[in-house]
Image (cartoon, coloured by chain):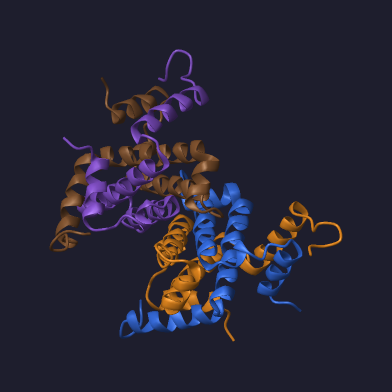
Chain colours: A blue, B orange, C brown, D purple
Amino acid sequence: MKTLTEEILDFNKARGWTDGNRDARNLAISVALEASELLEHFQWLPGKQAVEQNRDGIMEEAADVYIYLLQLADVAGFDLDGAAREKLQKNALKYPVPAGGHE
Amino acid sequence: MKTLTEEILDFNKARGWTDGNRDARNLAISVALEASELLEHFQWLPGKQAVEQNRDGIMEEAADVYIYLLQLADVAGFDLDGAAREKLQKNALKYPVPAGGHE
Amino acid sequence: MKTLTEEILDFNKARGWTDGNRDARNLAISVALEASELLEHFQWLPGKQAVEQNRDGIMEEAADVYIYLLQLADVAGFDLDGAAREKLQKNALKYPVPAGGHE
Amino acid sequence: MKTLTEEILDFNKARGWTDGNRDARNLAISVALEASELLEHFQWLPGKQAVEQNRDGIMEEAADVYIYLLQLADVAGFDLDGAAREKLQKNALKYPVPAGGHE
């Protein structure tokens, strides 16, 4: 079974989108633009209400952010899941669990 | 083995970060802010050069976008990988492969 | 003659948009969203080409950023022009002109 | 007395910042990045509280958005105030005042 990144790259290749879509700056811009389209669903609404009113739109924009993020990771040569696990470890050192745990 | 989302939720729970971090609007704002920090690495540099000069910083900011995105998906009740595969199918209908394929 | 801020406030008042539009967080989100719509014109194009192809669209999105920014300044109680002049003075100390001036 | 745009251009010229700072795409990216730094002050706080706790920081980031926006307007060849007044007129047609005014 193909990974999601492989599916995205195949999708682009079949359409000849292999030029601008392989430039890391274009991809970083695109991640930011899609993140704003995601945020647009929350412009005038509290979180819960926005999700109730437009869960499908939110899901779709979140997917767009993720699709560009996976392409950027591929172009820059890193694994996104691995990067997230590394970041969690780094955060764990930066924000240690309070002694006795959190009540 | 725990999923990445489970690891993030456990991380937050251990630190008592279970209030603001469970609000979808806060999370959507955070996704957008981290996407901008990612883009900041490309503010004055072409894509290749930015990646060469600061691959670690890019990896870390991409991880932050992803970590907030997974939390938003969890709060809104969808699976991010599933959402991306659905979006690719939708895009496939919107942008059909040219007859004879792309050369 | 009315200032631009006064015109915007009158515009909103005439339409009863005096609630959400007076919340600084909503306005900061809106500034960021409009800034992204501005950037969207440059997603796949070099700067010059984007301006040539869509100067009107760029002008309109820049106006939207500015209109929300003026509202945010009004709600937060500061003058945007004054803030910019102060920032330039601060930047002048941070980035002194090289001795002999720049050639 | 010099306009704010003239002051910004003189500031840049004195420091030799006349290359990347004259590219519309770089400027549009910078507007978006500064808008996010502005929004960062509101990441976890309601509007009023954010303004009370960090009015100076908000003022400074708003100034940065504005400074880049003025440069972009200059490079693209339009007047920002004029663009905003035009946009208000356009919005007035799009959102007519309800008959009898708003109560």
Q: Image height check: is A4 above or below A44?
A: below
Residue D1 percent across, percent down from the top left: 16, 35
Q: Which quarter of the image is occupied by the N terminus of chain C? A: top left
Q: Which quadrant of the figure has residue C6?
A: top left
Q: Is residue A96 visible?
A: no
Residue at 39% in and 36% down:
D78
Answer with left or right where residue A8 lies relative to residue D46: right
Among all residues in the image, which is located at the extreme right? B100
Q: Is residue A70 visible?
A: yes
Residue at 26% in and 58% down:
D16
Residue at 29% in and 47% down:
D67
Question: Between D86 and D75, which is closer to the camera in this rendering?
Answer: D75
Residue at 47% in and 74% down:
B51
Q: Which quadrant of the figure has residue C95?
A: bottom left
Residue C17 percent across, percent down from the top left: 40, 30
Residue B22 percent across, percent down from the top left: 46, 63
Answer with left or right where residue C56 lies relative to residue A74: left
Question: Between D33 and C91, which is closer to the camera in this rendering?
Answer: C91
Q: Which quarter of the image is occupied by the C terminus of chain C? A: bottom left
Answer with left or right where residue B60 lies relative to residue B96: left
